[in-house]
Image (tube, rainbow, N blue to C red):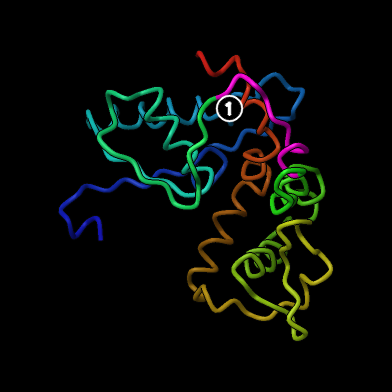
Amino acid sequence: MLLDLGLQVVAPDLMGFGGTDAPHVQPDSGHLSTYSLKRASDDIAALASLLHVDRFILGGHDWGGAVVYRVALWHPERVTGIFSVCTPYNAPSKTFVSLDQVVQRAPQFGYQKHLAGPEVEAEIKGKVQLRRFLNGMYGARTATKESLFDPKIGINFRVLPELGKSKLLTDEEMVYYVDEYDRHGMHGTLNWVSHRPLRLSPALLSS
């Protein structure tokens, strides 16, 4: 659709996804800024400069949507317009709200506590498990209509081997996604949840 409008389109991945680097960092490593919104915003601006694009329209989905807003805040001279899918605007705040507090107010975000812990990364390894995981995340159900994902709880590993086939992905698309996630494993992807405190920390709000 965007190409039909005569626009040049660039679709970068967030750090940890696709062909990007996916540094393995732990919460106490001192290198958490790799997965911060500030770092991602600066990366987008640097990529635009590399492509000799002075100003651009920026869109994103989920965590990418959060990045879109921050690029507009930290690099306003580069942005002519933004759009975000499924991510509402959250203004920077010097008051940190923990994930526990978020879940207490909005239980549907309970799954983020599961993703932020060690269990999902430890369980979803290798192409077989990645295929099952992606299959379930794209809506596959068991014969008894059980799903893999519960927004209040997280991932139900028990049903992984019992899931049918997702109707949302073709075989070719599934192979592509499995290969992409298998490149670095789940660590980089899950860092966007597990390193949430850094993205909201006051130190980064003025940087």
Residue at which label 1 appears: 34
- Left or right? Give the position of 45 relative to 164: left
Q: Height in image: 135 above or below 145? A: above
Residue 167: quarter of image: bottom right
State left or right for residue 50 relative to residue 84: left
In the rendered image, the vertical position of residue 97 relative to residue 8, given as above or below: above
Residue at (69% x, 78% y) in the render: 141
Q: Viewer-proximal residue, 100 or 9? A: 100
Q: Nearer the viewer, residue 94 or 45?
A: 94
* Magenta segment: 93-103
Identified by mark 1, the residue type is Thr
Q: Is residue 4 left or right of residue 103?
A: left
In terms of depth relative to the viewer, which is nearer, 85 or 105?
Answer: 105
What's the residue at 58%, 31% (across, down)? 35
Percent x, y for residue 206? 51, 13
The image position of residue 2, as x and y in percent, is: 24, 55
**Vertical arrangement, residue 66 with respect to residue 206, above or below:** below
Residue density around tag 1, few if under 14, some if 14–19, many if 20 or more, within 10 Å: many
For numbered disc 1, what is the local secondary structure? helix
The image position of residue 197, as x and y in percent, is 68, 28
What residue is rendered at 70% in x and 54% in y?
A: 108
**Which quadrant of the structure image shows residue 189?**
top right
Most extreme residue toward the left, as rendered? 6
